[in-house]
Image: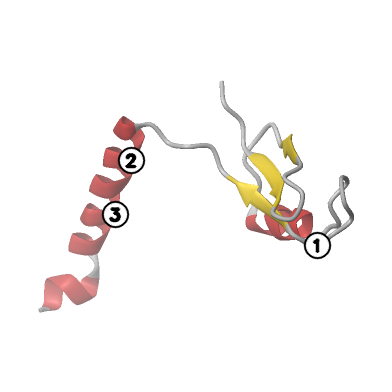
Amino acid sequence: MDSDSIQCRACGWSGNVGRSLTVYEQQRMEGSPCPGCGSLTLAYVPTQLSRRQQLANKRRQRYQIMASPSFVNN
C-alpha cells in the first residue's frame, strides 16, 4: 500500500508519512526544516489515486454542483 510522503525540493530528501494528514499537519510539516539539508522547502505529496477513485470523485463533485441551490435556481 502506498503512503503519503514529504519531499524536499532543494536536496531531494523524502520520507513516508504513513497516513493522510490534516491541512494543519501538512502546513506544519511543510514549514519545518528539511532533515537532509536544513532548507525550508519541504512539500507534502499525497498518494496517487487510482483511476476508479478519480472517476468516483468527479461524479461526486458533479452531483454536489447539480444539487447546489445556485445551480437549481438557474
**Quarter that holds the N terminus:** top right
Looking at marks 2 and 1 on the same chain, the residue that comes earlier in the sequence is marked by 1
Left or right relative to 48: residue 25: right
Looking at the image, is mark 2 or mark 1 nearer the viewer? 1
Q: CA distance from mark 3 to mark 2?
A: 11 Å
Residue at the location (38% across, 31% down)? 50
Q: Which residue is mark 3?
A: 61
Q: Using a 10 Å C-alpha cutoff, classify the residue at mark 2 as few (fewer than 14 neighbours), some (14 to 19) or many (20 or more).
A: few
Q: Amino acid at mark 3?
A: Gln
Whether tag 3 and tag 2 are in contact, CB under 8 A, the answer is no
Tell me: residue 16, above or below residue 66.
above
Query: x, y percentage for residue 19?
Result: 65, 35
Q: Secondary structure at mark 1?
A: loop
Q: Which residue is mark 2?
A: 54
Q: Using a 10 Å C-alpha cutoff, classify the residue at mark 3 as few (fewer than 14 neighbours), some (14 to 19) or many (20 or more).
A: few
**Quarter that holds the C terminus:** bottom left
65 or 32: nearer the viewer: 32
